[in-house]
Image (tube, grey):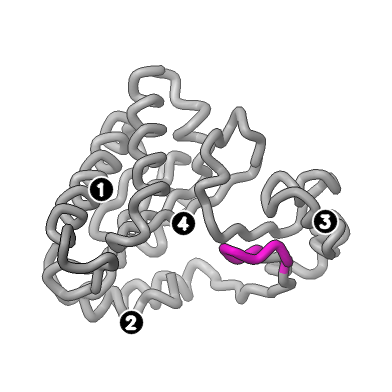
Amino acid sequence: MSALAGSVRAGLVQLWAFDPKGGMELAAGAPLFVRFSFEDPDAMAGDLEDAVKVLRRRAAALWGRARQHTATVDDPTLVILVDEIAALTAYVGDKKTRDRIKDALSLILSQGRAVGVHVVAAVQDPRKDVLPFRDLFPTRIALRLTEPEQADLILGDGSRDRGAICDLIPVALPGVGFVRLDGSPEPHRVRFSFHTDPQLADLAAAYAPEVAA
């Protein structure tokens, strides 16, 4: 969120947040969000379907004119943040709602990038039966993991052999992980900064959007 805060403040990026664990993980950033869904799975499905409508509207507007969306204040880049995406794709009790969520996310992940609709999601269990469309995420990040084979599940086959030793990251090094970028099989070691809840609250207060949704 901190990397996008300036663009959020300027109205060039909208954040739609989904926190199916009741909102506690993302609540500190709430002033930055145009939409914040955290209780009702049916409402979350509806918000994701609204994002699909944005995608389709932009695709129609770009037809024959351009192949990439350019963010403006009137039509900003849309970034969908999902904490623990498995809670939406595997653990929602109502199958019809779960299928709506899966369908919407699959469409956004497969068609959204060119029209400026992006998904940033976190997951603890990367298995296919939990996240069936994980291959649609072009950029993947793996932090410290418990099992050697999990690196390949997240980053792609052969990633651990190429150096993504996520299971060997020490507990004393929080934020260290490996990134695999779209189009490159090589994982890259990174370290992310840590923001406390008060720091996130200050960030959200300082960079809350100026432009109404």
Tell me where residue 72 appears, x and y as whole percent: 18, 75
Q: Report the mark closest to the observer, 3 or 2.
A: 3
Q: Foreground: 115 or 15? A: 115
Q: Secondary structure at mark 1?
A: helix
Q: CA distance from mark 3 to mark 2?
A: 35 Å
* Crowd rating for badge 3 (residues with CA inside 10 Å; few <14, some 14–19, many 20+): many
Q: Quadrant of residue 135?
A: top right
Q: CA distance from mark 4 to mark 3?
A: 23 Å
Amino acid under disc 3: Arg
**Can you tell which mark lies on residue 160?**
3
Q: Secondary structure at mark 3?
A: loop
Q: Are marks 3 and 1 in contact (CB under 8 Å)?
A: no
Q: Foreground: 48 or 156? A: 156
Q: Furthest residue to the front?
A: 64
Amino acid under disc 1: Ala
Q: Is residue 150 left or right of residue 192?
A: right
Quadrant of the snapshot with the C terminus? bottom left
**Can you tell which mark lies on residue 51?**
1
Amino acid under disc 2: Gly
Q: Is residue 57 left or right of residue 20?
A: left
Of callouts 3 and 2, the N-terminal one? 2
